[in-house]
Structure formats: structure tokens, C-alpha cells
């Protein structure tokens, strides 16, 4: 499967349900159409996030897409004989933009991990997925058994900290709150949600009173 075709599926916020080229190695050139698709994904995410998010790092996003495509293709195979070691991300792991850009596609890691649950514990595909999940904490929220993750870069950036805390709440991943700083970030988001709910209820009550008068 070409990278551009794979990106077309990701634009619809899903992974393909079957391999379009079974038994063949994935073709993953960083084509112009794939870059266009990644920019469109980036724009869509920013519509949902009013706070400032890091800039798009195209090299990191292309790398992540290549890894996701390779893993997805490997999961379609009957065994792990075609799994290769994951190359290092070309961008600085300590930059917020790197984590944000990788997460544009790695947010599908929980789905791939669930697909791999039926594989033997020593299957190379499961091992690679776990390594990626531990390396990219924003994308692996909700995956069981992933606790030893370095989240300093996420917590140091306002937009990523909010995204991380809200994803923990949405996916009910209590294991991530073993870190005190993460607990504080989650508590702050919960306080904001309660305050907003209180304001909405106050407006609602005011409208009801007006109608009754």
C-alpha cells in the first residue's frame, strides 16, 4: 500500500480494514500527496483545540506514518518474520512539535495494540508496539501496562498538557495519574469542566425563570 493511500484512510480518522496489497512490502515514499494529507489532519486537529498547539514537524509526521503503515501491514501477516526494528525518529524527542506531529497518526496505536492482543506474548509485533507506546506517551493513553513514560515535554507545553490530561480523562486511564504532576494537570482540567458546567447551568436556570415570569 502506498503511503498516500494509507493517509487517505487516516484522514477519515480510521485505519483500513484490510490490506490492499497482501504479501507485499509497504511502499512508503514521502510523497507530496501524503504531506498534503498530513497538513489537512493538522488543520482538523487545530479546529478542535482552541489553545495554542505546537507547529507541525513534517519530518516527524512522515516518520510516524511510515511506522504505523509498516506495523499495520505486519499485523496482517500470519507471523512476525517481516517485522524490522523501528528506526529512530529524525526529530528531537524533547521538542513539543515532535510529540504533537507524531501523535497526528500515532493516536491510532491503541487500536493496533488491541489488534495485537491475540498474538503470542513474545511476538515481535507486540514488542515493537510496546516500545512505541512507551516512547510516545501522548499517543499511548489507554493502553494497559504503559506507565514508565517520560511526560516532561508534554507537561511543559500548555496545549500538549491539556491534550494529554483530557485524553487521560476521556480514556479513563488512571494508571497515568501515578505521576503527581500529571494528577495536577488532570485535576486542573476537571476543575475547568466543573466551572464551565456551573456556568451553563446558571444560564439555563436564568432562562427557565424568565419563561416562568
Image: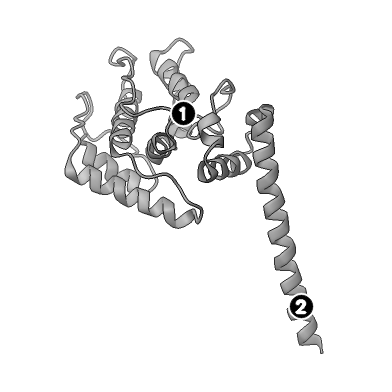
Front one among 188 and 65 = 188
| x and y, in percent, of residue 32 in the image | 18, 44
Q: Is residue 56 above or below residue 134?
A: below
The residue at 42%/37% (across/down) is: 103
Q: Residue at x 72, y 55 (%)?
A: 194
Of labels 1 and 2, earlier in sequence is 1
Q: Position of residue 92 (x, y in %)?
A: 37, 28
Relative to 27, say whether 161 is above or below: below
Which residue lies under the disc numbered 1? 136
Label 1 Cα neighbours within 10 Å, binned few <14 / some 14-19 / many ≥20:
many
Residue 34, compared with residue 143, is above or below; it is below
Residue at 70% x, 67% y is: 200
Q: Is residue 27 visible?
A: yes
Q: Is residue 117 visible?
A: no
Q: Where on the picture, by quarter, is residue 59?
A: top left
Q: What quarter of the picture does the C terminus occupy?
A: bottom right
Indicate which disc residue 65 carries.
Answer: none
Query: Residue 112 location in percent, x, y?
Result: 43, 30
Horizontal relation, residue 210 to residue 123: left or right? right
Residue carrying label 2: 206
Mark 2, Cα crowd under 10 Å, few <14 / some 14-19 / many 20+, is few
Amino acid at each position: 500500500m502506498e503511503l498516500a493511500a494509507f493517509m487517505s484512510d487516516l484522514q477519515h480518522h480510521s485505519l483500513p480494514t484490510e490490506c490492499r496489497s497482501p504479501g507485499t512490502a509497504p511502499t512508503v515514499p514521502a510523497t507530496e500527496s501524503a504531506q498534503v494529507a498530513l497538513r489537512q489532519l493538522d488543520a482538523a486537529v487545530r479546529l478542535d483545540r482552541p489553545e495554542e498547539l505546537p507547529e507541525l514537524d513534517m519530518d516527524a509526521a512522515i516518520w510516524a506514518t511510515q511506522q504505523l503503515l509498516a506495523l499495520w501491514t505486519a499485523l496482517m501477516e500470519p507471523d512476525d518474520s517481516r517485522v524490522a526494528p523501528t528506526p529512530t525518529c529524525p526529530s528531537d524527542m524533547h521538542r513539543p512539535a515532535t510529540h504533537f506531529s507524531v501523535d497526528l497518526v500515532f493516536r491510532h496505536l491503541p487500536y493496533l495494540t488491541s489488534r495485537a492482543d491475540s498474538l503470542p506474548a513474545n511476538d515481535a509485533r507486540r514488542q515493537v508496539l510496546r516500545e512505541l507506546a512507551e516512547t510516545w506517551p501522548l499517543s499511548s493513553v489507554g493502553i494497559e501496562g504503559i506507565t514508565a513514560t517520560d511526560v516532561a515535554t508534554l507537561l511543559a507545553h500548555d496545549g500538549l498538557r491539556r491534550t494529554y490530561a483530557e485524553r487521560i480523562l476521556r480514556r479513563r486511564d488512571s494508571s497515568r495519574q501515578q505521576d503527581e504532576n500529571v494528577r495536577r494537570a488532570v485535576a486542573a482540567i476537571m476543575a475547568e469542566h466543573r466551572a464551565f458546567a456551573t456556568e451553563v447551568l446558571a444560564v439555563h436556570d436564568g432562562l427557565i425563570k424568565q419563561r416562568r415570569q
